[in-house]
Each structure stands twice: as structure tokens, then as C-alpha cells.
Image: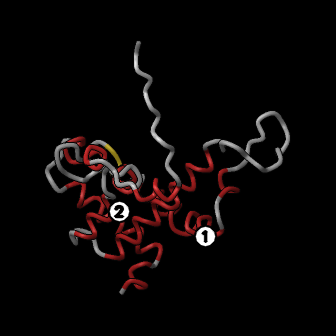
Amino acid sequence: MAKKKQRKPKLTAEEKAERQPTPETMKKLRSDVIAKLARQQKISPHLEMAALEVRLVWYAIVRGLLPGAASVEPRTGGKGGFRDPMDRMTQHELHCWQRHYGPWATWAGRQQVARTTLLDVVLAICCDNMAPSGKHGLDRWLAVKEGRALAALVTGLDKYAEIAGLQTRAA
């Protein structure tokens, strides 16, 4: 006769919070590329602030385009009940979108970097957390000389910081 497996007791919320990830899980986790670049002083503090604002606005746009899992808001009429993605933004996100991100994205979308645009390079690093260089880095993907993606990131974030007035606030 086969032995019954004993179930492990359920953990409380406190016990779950205290548990540490396994070494295997820690290997799979990726650190924030922008924070790492700032720690290594490859980007200055005002460029880090610009990158975080780019990420904030980009996530707000994406959040507005994706359907909510469980919307508690009344339907806006019609079958789909479509809402403008801008309606889902906070006042701060909307301000950043209109005054900083929009003009910057128009400019960055026109700047060519290898086989893509400067906008794509900045979004790949800031929002997709892609490393600028290394084995799986953007330099390799773009087939450009080592350091070119980082230089493009600095150029793009510098322009964003200029438009947003972050250089004067950080100084």
C-alpha cells in the first residue's frame, strides 16, 4: 500500500514575507539597468531622473492601452466601453506626457541609431530593462561598436532632461 504524502502546512503572510528566494531564483532575477548604470556612474543623477520619468510615462501609456482585469468603473457606453489611455493617467503623468515626453519622443523618433531610432534605444534600456552592452546587450543586437547604445542612451536622456528642465533641478 502506497504511503500518503503529507501536505506542508500553509504559511502565514508573515512567514511568506520572511522567506528568502532560492539561489536559483536569485540567478534569474535581473537588476534594474538604469539603477545599475547610475551606481556605476555611467549616467549622471539628472539622466537617471530623466530615465525614470520616461519609464513612468511609458508605463502609464501601456497601462492605458491594456484592459483592466477587473474594472470597477461604470461602462462608458457601447459594446467595448473604450476609454482614452490619457484618461487613465494621473495629473502628474499627463503633465509629463504633454510637456516632456511628447516633444522628446517626436525628436527622438527622428534620430537614427544604426538600424533603429534613438527613441527605440532609450525605451529598450529604460522600459524593457535591456542592457546597453554585453552578451545579450543592445550593442550586440544592433550590431554596433561596444558603447554605442550607452552613448545613444546618454544623448537621448540628455535631451529629455533638457526639455523637462531636470538639469537645472539636479544641479
Question: In front: 165, or 43?
Answer: 43
Question: In front: 74, or 65?
Answer: 74
Q: Position of residue 169 (x, y in %)?
A: 43, 84
Q: Residues within 10 Å of mark 1 (few under 14, many from 20)?
A: few
Secondary element under disc 1, as helix, strand or loop, is helix
Question: Which of the 4 quarters of the picture holds residue 140?
Answer: top left
- Relative to residue 53, is residue 105 depicted above or below? above
Q: Which residue is labeled 1 in the image?
A: 92
Q: Which residue is labeled 2 in the image?
A: 156
Q: Residue at x 40, y 72 (%)?
A: 49
Amino acid type at image mark 1: His
- Relative to residue 116, is residue 2 depicted above or below? above
Question: In front: 142, or 110?
Answer: 142
Residue furthest right in the image = 77
Q: How is the image coloured?
A: secondary structure
Q: Residue at x 31, y 45 (%)?
A: 25
Q: Position of residue 84 (x, y in %)?
A: 70, 50
Amino acid type at image mark 2: Gly
Q: Is 103 placed left or right of 125 in the picture?
A: right
Residue furthest left in the image = 145
Q: Residues within 10 Å of mark 2 (few under 14, many from 20)?
A: many
- Tell me which label, 2 or 1, sits earlier in the chain: 1
Q: Residue at x 45, y 62 (%)?
A: 54
| Nearest to viewer (mark 2 / mark 1) | 1
Secondary element under disc 2, as helix, strand or loop, is helix
Q: Quadrant of the N terminus?
A: top left
Q: Position of residue 170 (x, y in %)?
A: 38, 83
Q: Position of residue 91 (x, y in %)?
A: 65, 68
Q: Quadrant of the C terminus?
A: bottom left
